[in-house]
Amino acid sequence: MKPRLRSLVTALALLPLTALANGEEKRLERLEAQNRELNERLEALASMLEEEAGSPMHHSGGVIVGGYGSMKYTNLESGKKLDFHRFVLYFGKRISERVRFESELELEHAMAGASYSGAVELEQAYLAFDLDADTTLYTGLFLIPAGIVNETHEPTTFYSVYRPKVEKYIIPTTWWEGGAMLNRRLSGGWSVDVAVHSGLETSAGSDYKIRSGRQRVSSALADSLATTGRLKWTGMPGVELAATVLRQGDITQGQDPQAGGATLWSAHAILQRGPFGVRALIAEWRLDGDGPKAVGADRQRGWYVEPALRPWEKWGFFVRYETWNNKAGDNGGEDTRQGNIGVNFWPHPDVVFKAEYQKQSGSDDDGVLLGMGYRL
């Protein structure tokens, strides 16, 4: 066979193999491109969940874990105490592109049981449905959108060893309920939250104090549900303004004919300009009925202002003045006033050490407080 003819025959024989090889190469290239795209989408989803949770997280296969904790030492006139206050574990999972699950399980005071002061609490457990790019529906057990620290309360995110007293006794942080909540992000930095959820159950035995009415969604009485709405604006860097209104038809869940409905309104501002910052909050409850009015609990209110200076990345200084009263009605008592001054040291953005001095009116809770905290 002539050389040219032999070359032509060989080329014709190899043509199917060459085409097959080229097709396989293109298929592998498509698979690699799809794999890169999938990895990019998973990383984007994980980053979005980290941003929403406000803390760093570790993720594998769509499962996300995190948490936070704090230990506190108090040297007050009332006594000295060392307490590992909170140990919290976060678990979440991206179920689909539009559905995710998030939860928090907390152990308070290191030990829980009949002879211990601690408790094991399910603080969050909800499904989040992204209805579109700007609308999310939450169903399950979630934090009430009220105040500054109720939703964001990792120890690295606020000054002072303990959370502000106003956000303990008036906005009963940490405050969670079960139900459904719709969040809508609007243009210009505006957002709206509307929730229907389980309510409080106060009683005359506690002088209708708000904090004592938390049912923690543990076989909670649900004769009277509550409705909460919040409007928030974050349209300028370093600025957050928000207002919340809550209404419940019967704050005793039908257990006290001398009481009735209750309304909470609160507003807060967070301003940060370079190293200078300030937080301010005001909140008030109005309780219906002769029972709360007789003990002055028909009005329960408080406010605080907290200027701070963080001249260096790792050091920050603050002063806080606050006042609150769970019997602010005509037949009630005097306001409690408290001042705190202290320093935070962050050796790492997710680790903090705190020291402060506290003085409170009409009590023996004056003294020094030390704390450490972390988030994972």
Image (tube, grey):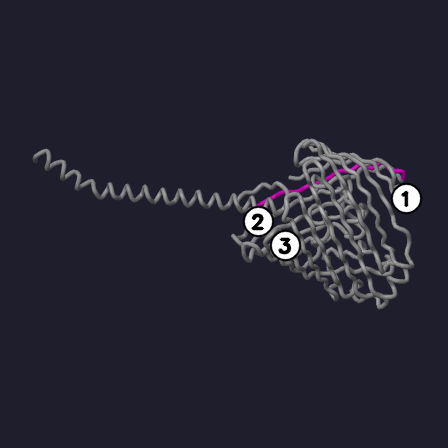
Q: Tell me residue 104's x, y (percent).
A: 66, 48
Of the residues under marks 3 and 1, which one precedes in the sequence? 3
Q: CA distance from mark 2 to mark 1?
A: 46 Å
In the rendered image, residue 271, in percent from the top left (x then y), is placed at 70, 44
Of marks 2 and 1, the one in the foreground: 1
In the image, residue 322 sits, relative to residue 132, either above or below, namely: above
Q: Quadrant of the N terminus?
A: top left
Q: Quadrant of residue 354?
A: top right
Kindly check if marks 2 and 3 are in contact, taking CB atoms under 8 A apart as contact.
no
Give the residue number, with chain letter if any, for mark 3. 191
Numbered disc 1: secondary structure: loop
Which residue carries the number 2 mark? Answer: 93
Span shown in magenta: 63-77
Q: Which residue type does callout 3 highlight? A: Ser
- Left or right: where does residue 318 sit relative to residue 98? right
Upstream in sequence: badge 2 or badge 3:
2
Q: Is residue 153 left or right of residue 357?
A: left
Secondary structure type for disc 2: strand
Residue 4, above or below 271: above
Q: Amino acid at mark 1?
A: Ser
Quick check: is 245 in the magenta stretch? Answer: no
Lower position in the chain sequence, tag 2 or tag 1? 2
Image quarter (top left, top right, bottom left or bottom right) of the C terminus:
top right
The dot on residue 363 is 1
The residue type indicated by label 2 comes to Lys
Number of other residues with Cα within 10 Å of mark 2, as a class: few under 14, some 14 to 19, many 20 or more: many
Crowding at label 3, few (<14), some or many (≥20) Cα neighbours within 10 Å?
Answer: some
Relative to 348, say whether 299 is above or below: below
* Main SS category, magenta section: strand
Whole-percent x, y for residue 85 in the image: 76, 42
- Residue drawn where x is 69% and y is 44% of the image: 88
Q: Within the image, what quadrant is residue 131 found in?
A: bottom right
